[in-house]
Image (cartoon, helix red, strand yellow):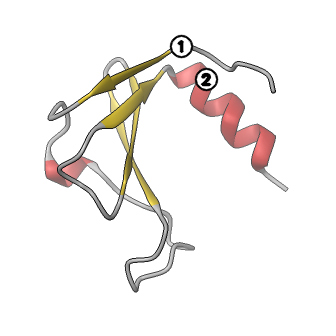
């Protein structure tokens, strides 16, 4: 496994309207993540636990992740 960047655990840094999930995600509340574009990077959280913790990754790390999973 290659480490793509550092992460920081945070709570409450993004407003509710800033979070979104993919249109390919299940609308029935399945196992999804939500992301938010933030000034310091990209926030990632569990869509089933929106009040819970989230992870902040750098924009470069998030782009590397997306490129690595894109088909």
The relative height of residue 51 versus residue 62 in the rendered view (above or below) is below
Label 1: few (<14), some or many (≥20) within 10 Å?
Answer: few
Spatial CA distance of label 2 from label 1 is: 8 Å
> What residue sits right under mark 2 in the picture?
61
Element at badge 1? Answer: loop
Say which quarter of the image contains residue 20. Answer: bottom left
Would you say the residues marked 2 and 1 are in contact, meaning their CB atoms lie under 8 Å apart? Answer: yes
The relative height of residue 31 versus residue 39 in the rendered view (above or below) is below
Counting from the top left corner in percent of width and height, residue 40 is at 35, 17
Label 2: few (<14), some or many (≥20) within 10 Å?
Answer: some
Counting from the top left corner in percent of width and height, residue 53 is at 27, 38
Q: Which mark is residue 6?
A: 1
Counting from the top left corner in percent of width and height, residue 27 is at 41, 83
Looking at the rendered image, the quarter that the N terminus falls into is top right
Q: Residue at x 20, y 32 (%)?
A: 11
Q: Residue at x 14, y 35 (%)?
A: 12
Please give the count of numbered marks on the rendered protein.
Answer: 2
The relative height of residue 5 versus residue 56 in the rendered view (above or below) is above
Looking at the rendered image, the quarter that the C terminus falls into is bottom right
Q: Which mark is residue 40?
A: none
Q: Is residue 13 left or right of residue 6?
A: left
Q: Nearer the viewer, mark 2 or mark 1?
A: 1
Q: Residue at x 16, y 51 (%)?
A: 16
Which residue in the rendered view is the most extreme toward the right? 71
């Amino acid at each position: 496994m290659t480490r793509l960047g550092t992460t920081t655990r945070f709570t409450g840094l993004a407003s509710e309207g800033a979070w979104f999930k993919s249109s390919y995600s299940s609308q029935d509340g399945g196992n999804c993540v939500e992301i938010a574009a933030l000034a310091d990077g990209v926030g990632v959280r569990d869509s089933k636990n929106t009040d819970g913790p989230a992870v902040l990754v750098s924009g470069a790390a998030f782009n590397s992740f997306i490129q690595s999973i894109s088909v």
